[in-house]
Amino acid sequence: MSRRGDNIHKRSDGRWEGRYISGRSDNGKAIYKSVYAHSYSECSDKLMLAKCDMLPISKPITLSEVFSAWLLSRKNRVKQSTYVNYRTLFDNYIYDNLGAKQVDRLNAFMLDRFADELMHSGGRNGNGLSAVTVQAVMIMLRSVLEYGALEYGLPDPAKNISMPKTESSEIQLFNAFEIAKLRSAALKGDSYELGVLLSLYTGLRIGELCALTWGDIDLISQVLYVKKTLFRIKNPNGTPKTIVVIDTPKSKNSVRIIPIPTFMLSALAKLKRDQPDNNYFLTCSADHTEPRTYSSRYRSFLKRLSIPYRKFHSLRHTFATECVKSGVDIKSLSELLGHSSVKITLEKYVHSDIELKRRELEKLCASI
């Protein structure tokens, strides 16, 4: 056996074994037990659960017990925000309804009925949840039960459940007149207003914009570097209730380099004078602003310009849609947006409008 870490060994059969003290005999001698896994990290996770007396070791096993094991197995594999989101989804929507139930007594009918109840009365004050939220709950639940089947030989009642269908909401865009108004006002405004324009012409997400520092903006090379994002999440430790986190972006593809439009260079250069690299772009100081606060300033900016309010993300949608209309190739657009695959870009933005269809038909007619 090869050793790697405290009380964790690789066995000759290829599995990892973790040993821990589960108790003491009458004469005080330590009683050892073992956990097994196919990787070191998984064995380490199981060993941690076992030491906390949270590892399910015999049937029947409740859904809460399996969820605890599943969640810990993901702790070092997902972002902190994702980890907290899993915990929140379980606590808010699953724990009271199914947490104490034994997994081997669950079936597909019960789970489908549970999803239906969430849709109709699962929210606050008995209101129904959105299909997107219910889908997120059920996808997580399916993963938890699949984990239980693989790790503990439990039945998997979620194999054949149907996922709630979500309808794509209509993407709200800024029109040419509104884009011109935003551009004119922002170029004369402060860093907060220029940030709106930067998102409109680069597709930055609001969290990425809030985390942007002057060191990420290279005016000589005329590019900006997207390396991090800023968001507020529920505090897993309880006090305070929420905390601000600055982390790497949404996915590895979201770490990217974006060209800065030439017409913005002069305005950016004026703001960047005497700014140290670690100062945040929006605040021009060492203190950041967070998405909720910046969204409020953005709303006020639109109101001052008499532009109907649209979500901040509409700036990104407008950027992507205008790129498609201008003939930017989809691979380049996908990289600019930081999508994990070209498929996402195609599904979200390549839905040509009537004018685009008209131009394409005119091309065809001219060639015949």
Image (cartoon, rainbow, N blue to C red):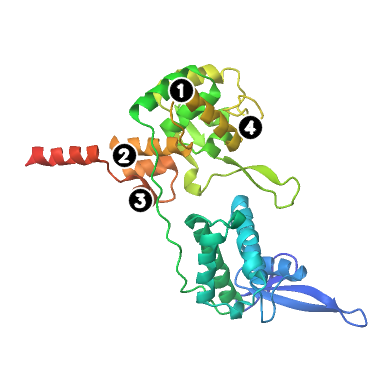
- Mark toward the viewer: 1 or 3: 1
123 and 52: which one is in front? 123
Residue 271 horizontal side relative to residue 169, left or right: right
Quadrant, the N terminus: bottom right
Q: Residue 91, how many percent across, how many down?
A: 65, 60
Res 358 → quadrant: top left
Residue underneath mark 2? 324
Q: Alpha carbon of mark 3 to alpha carbon of mark 2: how far?
A: 12 Å
126 and 301: which one is in front? 126
Q: Earlier in the sequence, mark 2 or mark 1?
A: 1
- Mark toward the viewer: 4 or 1: 1
Res 99 → quadrant: bottom right
* Direction left: furthest residue: 368
Q: Residues within 10 Å of mark 3 (few under 14, many from 20)?
A: few
105 and 3: which one is in front? 105
Res 175 → quadrant: top left
Q: Alpha carbon of mark 4 to alpha carbon of mark 3: how far?
A: 34 Å
Q: Residue 117, how many percent across, how many down?
A: 54, 65
Identify the secondary structure beneath mark 1. loop
Q: Amino acid at mark 1?
A: Leu
Q: Residues within 10 Å of mark 1 (few under 14, many from 20)?
A: few
Residue drawn at x 34%, y 49% as measured from the top left:
346
Q: Amino acid at mark 2?
A: Val
Residue underneath mark 4? 288
Q: Are marks 4 and 3 in contact (CB under 8 Å)?
A: no
Residue underneath mark 3? 347
Q: Earlier in the sequence, mark 4 or mark 2?
A: 4
Residue underneath mark 1? 305
Q: Are marks 4 and 2 in contact (CB under 8 Å)?
A: no
Q: Earlier in the sequence, mark 4 or mark 1?
A: 4
- Mark toward the viewer: 2 or 1: 1
125 and 345: which one is in front? 125
